[in-house]
């Protein structure tokens, strides 16, 4: 077929070099056929459709849709996971616009939408099964994480992280029993609050999200994982990634 197309294209291009058989049409899909609104031609083009299927059955939660969480959503929404649940009770404000994917308009910001509502409106154009929860995870709602296969924890408050991590360990979600004693997740709030002033920058938020998404894809077999590290730190000065806690 490709040879036949090439022969016809060559003849046509002698008349008009701009002519091509590759029109890249948008192929719409029925809901029963895919979680996507239209066909994922990127995976087929790269020859990774069979590998991508390893993610199909997963129910994913993203807790916190600020700088890091919004970039996590940007990537996870482009995978065929079964469901993506978004949890955040905050409003999407102008400072959020400078730490999130895409470019909200002034009218978007004037409406002061909930972060979850705003991001759901964008990414549901692509992925059908994004479930908005416009409220935070706390003692009353932490039970809603039960049944998830993986949870991206993108919040900074220590008490909330401790609550969520404890629940996830009870549910055996997102952690390995042999590695829990390392206690890599800090549960206390920094007194000088360096995180708020020095790390809340769009490029570092995005890098943090990308490293988390790569780690998630390794855990579920999308990427090869020879070292099986479960803790990584990135040093800006020197551009180094250090891996520890190999399983």
Image: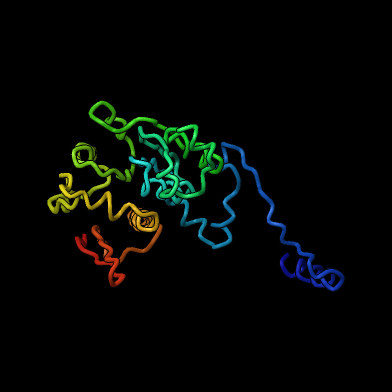
| Above-or-below relation of 129 to 183 | above
* x, y percent for residue 71: 41, 50
Name of the residue lying farthest toward the left: 181
Q: Is residue 129 visible?
A: no
Instruction: Give the colouring mode of the picture.
Output: rainbow
Question: As rendered, which of 203 and 83 lies closer to the eye?
Answer: 203
Q: Is residue 96 visible?
A: yes
The reply, left or right, for residue 78 in relation to residue 61 is: right
Question: As rendered, which of 178 and 140 lies closer to the eye?
Answer: 140
Please tell me which residue is depicted at 85% across the width and 73% down the height of the picture: 14
* x, y percent for residue 62: 36, 42
Q: Quadrant of the C terminus?
A: bottom left
The reply, left or right, for residue 192 in relation to residue 153 is: left
Name of the residue lying farthest toward the top: 140
Name of the residue lying farthest toward the right: 15
Q: Quadrant of the N terminus?
A: bottom right
The reply, left or right, for residue 3 in relation to residue 120 is: right
Please tell me which residue is depicted at 39% across the width and 58% down the height of the picture: 203
| Above-or-below relation of 21 to 239 | above
Please tell me which residue is depicted at 24% across the width and 65% down the height of the picture: 243
Q: How many marks?
A: 0
The reply, left or right, for residue 58 in relation to residue 17 is: left
**Residue 131, quarter of the rendered image:** top left
* x, y percent for residue 59: 39, 40
* x, y percent for residue 150: 33, 44
Please tell me which residue is depicted at 36% across the width and 34% down the height of the picture: 90
């Amino acid at each position: 077929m490709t040879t036949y197309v090439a022969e016809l294209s060559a003849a046509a291009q002698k008349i008009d070099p701009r002519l091509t058989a590759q029109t890249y049409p948008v192929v719409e899909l029925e809901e029963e056929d895919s979680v996507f609104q239209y066909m994922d031609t990127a995976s087929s083009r790269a020859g990774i459709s069979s590998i991508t299927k390893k993610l199909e059955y997963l129910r994913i939660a993203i807790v916190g849709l600020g700088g890091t969480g919004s970039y996590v959503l940007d990537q996870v929404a482009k995978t065929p996971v079964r469901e993506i649940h978004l949890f955040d009770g905050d409003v999407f404000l102008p400072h959020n616009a400078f730490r999130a994917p895409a470019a909200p308009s002034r009218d978007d910001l004037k409406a002061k939408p909930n972060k979850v509502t705003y991001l759901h409106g964008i990414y549901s154009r692509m992925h059908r099964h994004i479930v908005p929860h416009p409220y935070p995870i706390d003692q009353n709602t932490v039970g809603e994480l039960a049944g998830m296969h993986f949870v991206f924890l993108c919040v900074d408050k220590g008490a909330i992280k401790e609550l969520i991590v404890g629940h996830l360990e009870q549910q055996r979600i997102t952690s390995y029993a042999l590695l829990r004693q390392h206690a890599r997740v800090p549960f206390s709030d920094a007194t000088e609050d360096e995180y708020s002033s020095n790390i809340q920058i769009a490029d570092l938020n995005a890098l943090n999200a990308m490293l988390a998404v790569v780690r998630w894809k390794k855990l579920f077999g999308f990427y090869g994982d020879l070292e099986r590290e479960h803790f990584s730190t990135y040093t800006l000065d020197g551009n180094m990634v250090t891996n520890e806690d190999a399983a």
